[in-house]
Image (tube, rainbow, N blue to C red):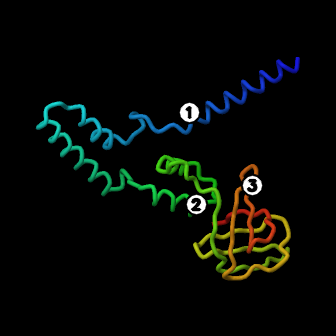
Amino acid sequence: MPQVRLAVILAACALGASSSLVAAAPKSAAERAKVLQQVVDCRKITDAGERLACYDRSAQALDDAEKTGQVVVVDQAKAREIRRQSFGFALPSLSVLNLAGNGDGVDRLETTIESARELSDGRFVIHTVDGATWRQVDGDLPRTPKAGQRFVVTPGALGSFFCHVDNQLGYRCKREN
């Protein structure tokens, strides 16, 4: 009987792993922006003159779409910056930015405290130099946070986060803006 349980657990793990691999797969041609796919499709044309005319038309259409905001072009560096700025927010719609990276997801935020204030319940709200606001959810701080101190946020379980001020023990926190 224990062998049957082990087989069921292994099958469930394999199914979970395969579904996460499918979710991480790059976009297919059907999911690409139409104007980008038109540029790519020009490669299929064998006649050099027709292929060049196709590239000219589709490149113009792609350029027009980018200028009007119908298509947004983001390089890896910009995608990484956006992921860093949005660290701590539950924004599944930004998961498209993970395609621009090479598995270099932002797994922690390291910044500096701009200001900190204590609330009436003894917990703190910390504003960082990059404009984020983090509220203490629970835990204790042995020393009051001050401007200029190092501030590190790491993910915890079930979508929670831990904040660390100048290498002190972490406390649970949540991002407010």
Q: Residues within 10 Å of mark 1 (few under 14, many from 20)?
A: few
Q: Residue at x 20, y 32 (%)?
A: 45
Q: Residues within 10 Å of mark 2 (few under 14, many from 20)?
A: some
User: Residue 54, how many percent across, how many down?
Assistant: 19, 40
Query: What distance separates the C-alpha of mark 2 from that of mark 1?
Result: 24 Å
Q: Residue at x 82, y 18 (%)?
A: 4
Return the disc, 1 or 3, that comes first in the chain's sequence.
1
User: Residue 124, how many percent across, how many down?
Assistant: 77, 74
Q: Amino acid at mark 3?
A: Gly
Query: What distance separates the C-alpha of mark 1 from that of mark 3?
Result: 25 Å
Q: In the picture shown, does residue 159 fall above or below 148? A: above
Q: Residue at x 24, y 31 (%)?
A: 44
Q: Amino acid at mark 2?
A: Ser
**Disc 2 or disc 1, which is closer to the eye?**
1
Q: Residue at x 63, y 66 (%)?
A: 177
Residue for badge 3:
156
Residue for badge 2:
86
Who is closer to the viewer here, 88 or 170?
170
Return the disc, 2 or 1, that comes first in the chain's sequence.
1
Q: Residues within 10 Å of mark 3 (few under 14, many from 20)?
A: few
Identify the element where label 1 is drawn: helix
Q: In the picture shown, does residue 112 fall above or below 24? A: below
Residue for badge 1:
22
User: Residue 70, how many percent across, how many down?
Assistant: 36, 51
Q: Quadrant of residue 120?
A: bottom right
Return the disc, 2 or 3, that comes first in the chain's sequence.
2
Identify the element where label 3 is drawn: loop
Direction from residue 40 to residue 143 in the image, left or right: right
Query: What distance separates the C-alpha of mark 2 from that of mark 3?
Result: 16 Å
